[in-house]
Image (tube, grey):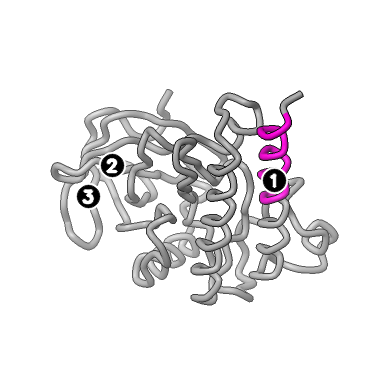
Amino acid sequence: MSQILRIGQQVTAASSRMECSVREFLGGGGQGEVYRAALSDRAVALKWYLPACATPHQRSSLGFLIRTGPPTDRLLWPLELATAANVPGFGYIMPLREPRFHGISGLMKRRIDPSFRVLTMAGFELAHSFLHLHSKGLCYRDISFGNVFLDPATGGILICDNDNVSVDGDTAGGILGTPRFMAPEIVRGDSLPSIQTDLFSLAVLLFYLSWRSTVSICPP
């Protein structure tokens, strides 16, 4: 159940000054809560940060990402900052994930059973999407099951939680990654997330996809 914003509450998009209405609580995590919302007549997603995460650095990082724009439409990129009267902190508006996309964790648990061709296409799209991101000098920092969604009919992918993206080499803090996907040098404390450590995490994710595709071809 929502703890920050109430259903029907209005928040204001920072640059366009348009009103955005909260419609449904979708879920929460360590950084904040995500809602389905309506920006004018457009369905969008709204992430609102918990007070401890609504830092000046996070706000500045979001502003940079919004100005930079998405490297590809496969990334559910921040569109605008958002504020609300009588609610501390801030959030941001991003595209809403279509229902046809399912979490990769559901794939691992066999809740969806795509074909080998679909999984191959998903692997290609993942690699291509992160290539676009890295070509902009940006690193994702947290490639894992929880941040990638798959269309089991086509192999199309969507990548969420792009508010953690940073400039490669940025040492100002931020998320370090997810256990089992983090590069060894990050786990040891020898390095911070970078494009190179992204590639390690991507390789782990592609390994899981390749394992799952083998299961699809040769079921037990």
- Among the two numbered marks 1 and 2 on one chain, the one whose residue lies closer to the N terminus: 2
Vertically, is 216 above or below 140?
above
Q: Amino acid at mark 2?
A: Asn
Dot label at residue 86: 2
Q: Is residue 53 left or right of residue 176?
A: left
Q: Identify which residue is drawn at 54% across, 46% down.
A: 148
Q: Identify which residue is drawn at 18% across, 60% down.
A: 16
Looking at the rendered image, the quarter that the N terminus falls into is top left
Quadrant of the image occupied by residue 7: top left
Q: Which residue is mark 1?
A: 210
Which region is colored magenta? 205-218
Q: Is residue 209 magenta?
A: yes
Dot label at residue 12: 3
Q: Position of residue 128 (x, y in %)?
A: 53, 63
Q: Is residue 137 magenta?
A: no
Q: Position of residue 135 (x, y in %)?
A: 52, 75
